[in-house]
Structures are given as C-alpha cells and as structure tokens.
Image (cartoon, rainbow, N blue to C red):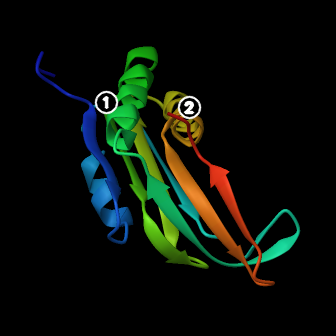
Amino acid sequence: MSENHDPIRLLAVREAPLSLDEVHAAVGDDAAGGTTLFVGTVRDHDGGKPVAALEYSAHPTALRELRRIAEEVCADFPVQALAAVHRTGRLEIGDVAVIVAVSCPHRGEAFAASRRLIDDLKHGVPIWKHQVFADGEEEWVGAGSC
C-alpha cells in the first residue's frame, strides 16, 4: 500500500439509477478479507401507511458532507476501500435509494465500518425524502441537516 492510497474510491449523490456492480467493483482490494455491501431500497410502506412513491432532494453541500463522513469512518476503522452513493429525484417502490460498501482486513471491521457509514450518512448528509402516500397525503423526512 502506497502513502497515496486513498481508501475513498467512490462517492456520489446523483439522479441516475445506482449500480451494485459499480459500487462492488470500487471497493475491491487485495488487502481486504471482508467486504460489506448495504443496499437501501424504497419500501411500500412507512409508519403503517402505504407509500406510492418518493423523491429525494439534496442540498448543494451533500457531497461535501458525505466526504467528511467517509473520511471519519476511514480514520476510525482500518478501511481498505469505501464507496457510498445516494440517489436523488423520483423513485418508485423497489428502486435502489442508497448503496454503501466497505472493505477491511477482517469481516467484523467491515461490518462495523459499513454500519457506521450508513448510519452517519442518514443522519449527517443533507438529503431529504418527500414521501407520497397511497391516500394522497405527503410528508417530508430529513435524512440529514445543514
């Protein structure tokens, strides 16, 4: 591993559909013995109410905040490679909304780093979810704050 090794291989907040293959390929590393991949999808309900669709909006600082969180995860765990992508725009039931992946020397580290990455992303990156329920009601949910 060179001194210029940057474990943050892929970060994106984008409207285009997300690719599991792209994220998995980004975290491939010969020094990693464990790789975790978390995929968040749009479910058909929330709070006991049927969801018809949702739309994600991101603040212009979202990618910068995502990088800050990724750097913190890399500082706290022996991360060999890390990737995180979040979708924006209108999504339908079953669509992939977020993917995070982490490779570490061992599986326990990979699981812990991945869990921290998705939890901190959901709480710290300024991305908001606009849910449209089947009954026509709507709700905004903050996935992060400025």
Q: Give the residue number, with chain letter if any, for mark 1.
A: 80
The reply to whether residue 78 is in sight is no
**Which amino acid is tagged 1?**
Gln
Q: Nearer the viewer, residue 10 or 144?
A: 144
Residue 51 occupies quadrant: bottom right
Distance from label 1 to label 2 (Cα)? 15 Å
* Residue 54 drawn at (x, y percent): 59, 71
The 10 Å Cα crowd at callout 1, few under 14, some 14 to 19, many 20 or more, is many
**Which amino acid is tagged 2?**
Arg
Give the label, 1 or 2, closer to the camera: 2
* Residue 68 drawn at (x, y percent): 37, 26
Rendered image: mark on residue 37: none
- Upstream in the sequence, badge 1 or badge 2? 1
Q: Secondary structure at mark 1?
A: loop
Residue 145 occupies quadrant: top right
Q: At 50% across and 68% down in the image, what residue appears?
A: 96
Q: At 41% across and 39% down in the image, what residue appears?
A: 102
Q: At 76% across and 84% down in the image, what residue appears?
A: 134
Q: Is 8 displayed left or right of 95 in the figure?
A: left
Q: Is 116 displayed left or right of 74 in the figure?
A: right
Q: Secondary structure at mark 2?
A: helix
Evaluate if marks 1 and 2 touch, with contact meaning CB atoms under 8 Å apart. Answer: no
Q: Give the residue number, with chain letter if any, for mark 2.
A: 116
The 10 Å Cα crowd at callout 2, few under 14, some 14 to 19, many 20 or more, is some
